[in-house]
């Protein structure tokens, strides 16, 4: 049952600023997300959740330790290579401002593929398939403003995992939605991860974190605890308990 | 727990015997509140004693079936719109534990409230995840909907517990921070003409004075 590891963080620290203004955002974090696995990160404001997500997506590099996405060690890549890594492997779902308002749902999903050099026709075919996986093939020609919040988030999930992308990073994706719509979005995210993606979800909402296989708690830049799933003896739970 | 009201609601659909009632009750609440057959028959006897149900007359075969009397039907209808009363809080081990954790001083060391909260939160979230797993498998048919709503009720209750634990954690942390920074207690006699300017201004002056 051990699926390949899509995201691996080993002894990751991240220090912002210098001298007296030094802030240790992360202090020795170990984390693994396998294909087919959804991991939620919870913790109070300022605990390092955003830094963790930025590192996972190659938007930032660690001060020490390693972050590996697929086979790439993010810390050794230059900015250009990290941008390529993000385009190819990583998708984001934010609380809002996810979609380009001037583009239709289909065009929004097509965008990352075209940026990555796919032909328009091939990108269109893949994007259409991606929209179907989130149950929105009917709304391909709608603009974001003509969709509900839940529909827009499902488009964002389709886009995050279109083409070869296998790592979805979600930052409060249900934040602005009511409870039923939020649950529907979590259900779609869960299905896409079950279909073989790896997901890292940052949320304040315990009810939505409960859709994850594991929940990791950060406080002051340290993983203080983790709920285990049936992740086997290598799971973070065991490590956290032994630590 | 209102098995009694549940039976009246079920009998408003059709007459049933005890075993059927038990089965229906469990099926429609997703097996969350299992009943033993003894409970089912005792409940039926009490409903009959109170004149809310009566045996179906001239029912030849099988175990005795019961139907609602007029009074039973009225009670079944009234139940839907009668709010469930919040009873006096049950003795909640978790609330008691936390209340004691912030006050008890075992010899030699205090209780690590943050650790108490964290251990509980992990356990609560594990329960939350298990309920959510069950919810993922709940279907869209009427039975699935009923089951899914029962699960939601458990999910929201655990969520409330987690939020309360978060609240306990930050309240305790804030109280500790206040203890560590003692307030400026030096008495300052306000000049009568200064009365209007007491409050923040004065505090600011005192703080600035102290910094010099």
Image (cartoon, rainbow, N blue to C red):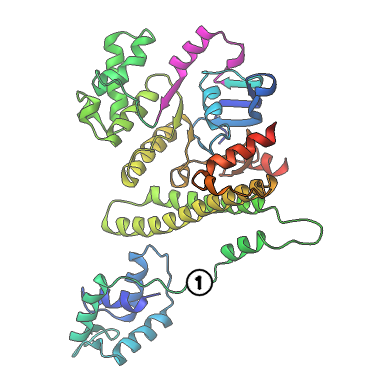
Residue A96, located in which quarter of the rendered image? top left
Residue placed most toward the observer, B145 or B190 = B190
> Against A119, is B118 above or below?
below
* Residue A235 spot, x, y in % from top left: 62, 39
Spot occupied by residue B30 in the image (x, y as percentages of width and height): 38, 62
Residue A72 covered by magenta stretch: yes
Chain under disc 1: B
Query: SS at mark 1?
Result: loop
Residue A146 in the image: state x and y as whole percent: 20, 29
The N terminus of chain B lies in quadrant: bottom left
Residue plotted at (59% across, 21% down):
A68
Magenta-drawn stretch contains B145: no
Q: Which residue is mark 1?
A: B90
Looking at the image, which is closer to me, A78 or B143?
A78
Q: Is residue B15 above or below residue A185?
A: below
Label 1 packing within 10 angstroms: few (<14), some (14-19), many (20+): few
Query: Which range is magenta?
Result: A69-94
Q: Position of residue B207 (x, y in %)?
A: 64, 37
Image-based side of B123 in relation to B75, left or right: right
Where B101 falls versus A85 (above or below)? below
In the depicted structure, whether residue B53 falls above or below residue A76: below
The quadrant the C terminus of chain B occupies is: top right
């Amino acid at each position: 049952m051990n699926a390949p590891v899509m995201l691996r963080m080993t002894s990751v620290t991240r220090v912002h600023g210098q001298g007296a203004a030094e802030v240790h955002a992360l202090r020795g974090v170990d984390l693994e997300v396998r294909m087919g696995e959804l991991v939620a990160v919870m913790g109070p404001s300022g605990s390092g959740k955003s830094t963790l997500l930025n590192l996972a997506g190659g938007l930032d590099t660690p001060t020490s330790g390693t972050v590996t996405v697929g086979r790439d060690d993010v810390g050794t890549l230059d900015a250009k290579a990290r941008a390529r890594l993000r385009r190819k492997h990583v998708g984001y779902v934010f609380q809002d401002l996810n979609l380009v308002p001037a583009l239709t749902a289909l065009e929004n999903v097509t965008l990352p593929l075209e940026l990555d050099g796919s032909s328009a026709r091939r990108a269109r075919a893949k994007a259409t398939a991606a929209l179907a996986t989130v149950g929105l093939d009917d709304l391909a020609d709608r603009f974001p403003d003509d969709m509900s919040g839940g529909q827009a988030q499902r488009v964002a999930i389709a886009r995050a995992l279109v083409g070869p992308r296998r790592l979805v990073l979600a930052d409060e994706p249900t934040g602005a939605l009511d409870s039923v719509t939020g649950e529907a979005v979590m259900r779609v995210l869960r299905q896409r991860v079950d279909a073989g993606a790896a997901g890292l979800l940052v949320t304040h909402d315990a009810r939505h974190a409960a859709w994850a296989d594991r929940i990791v708690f950060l406080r002051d830049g340290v993983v203080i605890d983790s709920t285990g799933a049936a992740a086997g003896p290598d799971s973070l739970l065991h490590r956290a308990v032994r630590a | 727990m209102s098995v009694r009201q549940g039976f009246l609601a079920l009998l408003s659909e059709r007459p049933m015997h005890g075993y059927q009632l038990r089965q229906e009750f469990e099926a429609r609440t997703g097996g969350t509140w299992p009943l033993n057959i003894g409970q089912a028959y005792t409940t039926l006897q009490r409903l009959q004693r109170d004149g809310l149900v009566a045996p179906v007359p001239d029912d030849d075969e099988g175990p005795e079936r019961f139907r609602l009397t007029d009074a039973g039907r009225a009670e079944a209808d009234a139940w839907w719109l009668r709010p469930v009363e919040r009873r006096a809080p049950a003795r909640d081990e978790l609330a008691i534990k936390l209340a004691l954790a912030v006050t008890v001083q075992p010899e030699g060391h205090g209780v690590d409230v943050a650790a108490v909260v964290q251990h509980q939160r992990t356990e609560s979230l594990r329960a939350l995840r298990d309920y959510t797993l069950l919810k993922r498998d709940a279907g869209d048919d009427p039975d699935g909907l009923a089951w899914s709503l029962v699960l939601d009720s458990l999910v929201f209750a655990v969520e409330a517990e987690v939020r309360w634990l978060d609240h306990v954690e930050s309240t305790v942390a804030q109280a500790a921070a206040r203890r560590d920074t003692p307030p400026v207690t030096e008495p300052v006699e306000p000049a009568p003409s200064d009365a209007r300017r007491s409050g923040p201004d004065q505090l600011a002056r005192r703080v600035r004075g102290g910094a010099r």
